[in-house]
Amino acid sequence: MKIEWLGHSAFRLTESTGSSIVTDPFDGAVVGYDMTRVEADAVTSSHGHADHNYFAPVKAPVVIDETGSFDVNGIAVNGILTNHDPEEGALRGKNTVYKYRLDGVTVCHLGDIGESCSAELIEQLIPVNILLIPVGGNYTIDADQAKEYVDNIMPDVVIPMHYKTKHTELDIDKVDGFLRLFDDEQIVEADSATLEFDRYDFDGDSTKVIVPKRLKA
């Protein structure tokens, strides 16, 4: 399966069959740069903010923006209700975490999760092979909180998202603070925006943090 970073919190997940899903498409006027136009079988949105639910760049027949279990041409999708802030949604509302199952690989996209890590939530999320996690703070969890999620979920791979890059206009932190919380040998700076994985890649013994190339732009 493939994971292609499209900017901010948007990714295209593609199974070996060709079935694909785009996560949290964004409005370039809000983020500071435009999202690449793509096609997919479905698009998921974690919540109703323009940097996560702007569907114009995505040509897809199905939109999923709620909790529950879904099937997208063989890709299993499960939406789990969480909070966008530490006040049980009183500040910024609710957030849906999505888990996807492609080619035997479980991918978890935390959206704009803002609540503190809890044993109850972790039980709903695990197991996870690949964790897509916000690290920029302010509107969501920050680097230290993200590290706590990683330590409790114990995924094989972590891909940071929702952080400040060269052209990002949102008031969020850069990825550096998150990366400093890991040993150098755990961090992989990829030479492409598209990453390929196989279920046999994961041994469960360690966690790698992979930064796709375009995230450094």
Image (cartoon, rainbow, N blue to C red):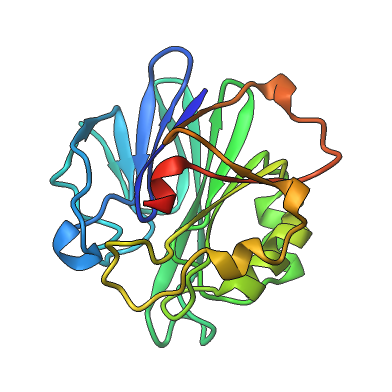
Question: Could one spot residue 50 in this view of the protein?
Answer: no
Q: How many marks?
A: 0
Write the residue at 43% across / 52% down.
Answer: 216
Which residue is situated farthest in the right direction here? 205
Q: Residue at x 59, y 25 (%)?
A: 197
Q: Position of residue 128 (x, y in %)?
A: 68, 43
Left or right relative to 37: residue 135: right
Q: Is residue 90 above or below residue 67?
A: below
Q: Is residue 69 visible?
A: yes
Q: Residue at x 67, y 55 (%)?
A: 124
Q: Nearer the viewer, residue 165 or 208?
A: 165
Residue drawn at point x = 43 percent, y = 64 percent: 163
Residue found farthest to the top: 17
Question: Where residue 158 appears, x then y in whole percent?
Answer: 62, 48
Q: Is residue 32 left or right of residue 84?
A: left
Q: Quadrant of residue 143?
A: bottom right
Q: Position of residue 212 (x, y in %)?
A: 48, 42
The picture places residue 157, in percent across and down from the top left corner, at: 66, 42
The residue nearer to you, when weighing 196 against 179, is 179
Q: Is residue 30 left or right of residue 217?
A: left
Rendered position, 165 above or below 125: below
